[in-house]
Image (cartoon, rainbow, N blue to C red):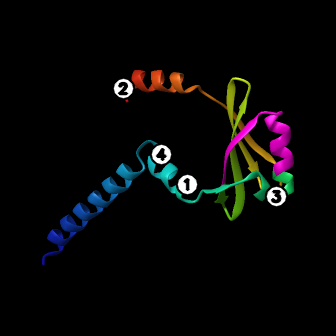
Amino acid sequence: MELSKFRWMLAGVLAIGVAGCTCSTKHGEGKEEEDEKNEVKVTLDQLPAPVKATLDKESDGGKVGDIDKEMKDGKAVYEADVAVGDKSYEIRIAEDGTLLKKKLEKPEDEKKEEGEKDGK
């Protein structure tokens, strides 16, 4: 096979490979799916004491829903859904009890409206 034909074939294969990679991670979807595979459901009783203490403090007497444990860079991170009054929060806590994130979640009807506006 001529060298120029080989280069064109190699360029085509690489282009297809790159296109395939970008499609699987479009808008971060591939990353989210990968993260969800690493998640394990846990209960309040299974939380390390520092994580439970932080969750109790941050949930402020609210109702704790699903709790997921996932590994990030070799360390456990816990994510809980918490309802406080009429608001919902996503709370992320490191295994040592450090609060990583407390995010106010949008109500489902707002998410639907936003999805309609985005054309989804």
Mark 4 or 2, nearer chain start: 4
Between disc 3 and disc 1, the foreground one is: 3
Res 48 label: 3
Q: Residues within 10 Å of mark 2 (few under 14, many from 20)?
A: few
- Quadrant in the picture for the N terminus: bottom left
Question: Residue at left 18%, top 74%?
Answer: 3
In the image, which residues are magenta? 52-68
Q: Is residue 33 left or right of residue 97?
A: left
Q: Which residue is mark 4?
A: 28
Question: Residue at left 37%, top 30%?
Answer: 120
Mark 3 or 4, nearer chain start: 4
Q: CA distance from mark 1 to mark 2?
A: 26 Å
Q: Which residue is mark 1?
A: 35
* Three-letter residue code for mark 2: Gly
Q: Residue furthest left?
A: 1
Mark 1 or 4, nearer chain start: 4
* Three-letter residue code for mark 4: Gly
> Picture coordinates of residue 103 (x, y %)?
68, 34
Res 119 label: 2
* Three-letter residue code for mark 1: Asp
Whether the residues at callouts 4 and 2 have beta carbons within 8 Å, the answer is: no
